[in-house]
Amino acid sequence: MKWIVERDALIAQTLAFVQSVTGRKDDVLQPERTPVATTVAVELVAVEAAAVEIELAQAPVPLPPTPLPPARAIGDFRTEMQARIANFRKHQERFEREREEYCAETLTRLRAAIHDASGPSAKK
């Protein structure tokens, strides 16, 4: 019989903890709350726990089976990954090509500006 009382106390404590975490955070954080109010809440939860235990004793209603999504074939996954990798590589190659072109264009303009700047100053 002692184990029944311990079990009921554990259930009551667990429910009190769950309620304090989920539903009644404001009550827990208030500093004016007294320990007497806490014990009263635990006692009320113990009564609720007994009611929940009685409800759980009844036979549960079985859930209808849910259909599983169709499994992907390994080949489909592999081809999809290969296609994604190929697209990624194409983008990276395009970015590298554009960087190279921009760098070459910038260097050409820079060399032309240096050449133009050095030409007239040398003549004066």
Image: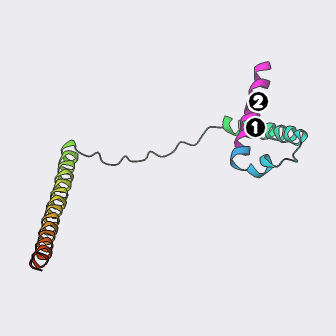
Q: Amino acid at mark 1?
A: Ala
Q: Nearer the viewer, residue 67 or 83?
A: 83
Q: Which mark is residue 23?
A: none
Residue 1 visible to the viewer: no
In the displayed structure, does residue 69 sit left or right of residue 11? left
> Range of the magenta residues?
1-18
Image coordinates for residue 46, horizontal then vertical, percent:
80, 36
Q: Nearer the viewer, residue 71 or 58?
A: 71
Secondary structure under the numbered disc 1 in the rendered image:
helix
Mark 1 neighbour density, 10 Å: few (under 14) some (14–19) many (20 or more): many
Residue, x 43% and y 47% (percent of image)?
66
Q: Earlier in the sequence, mark 1 or mark 2?
A: 2
Read off the residue under disc 2: 8
Q: Amino acid at mark 2?
A: Asp
In the displayed structure, does residue 77 sit left or right of residue 120? right
In the displayed structure, does residue 6 sit left or right of residue 105? right
Image coordinates for residue 91, horizontal then vertical, percent:
19, 59
Relative to 18, residue 116 above or below: below
Relative to 78, residue 106 above or below: below
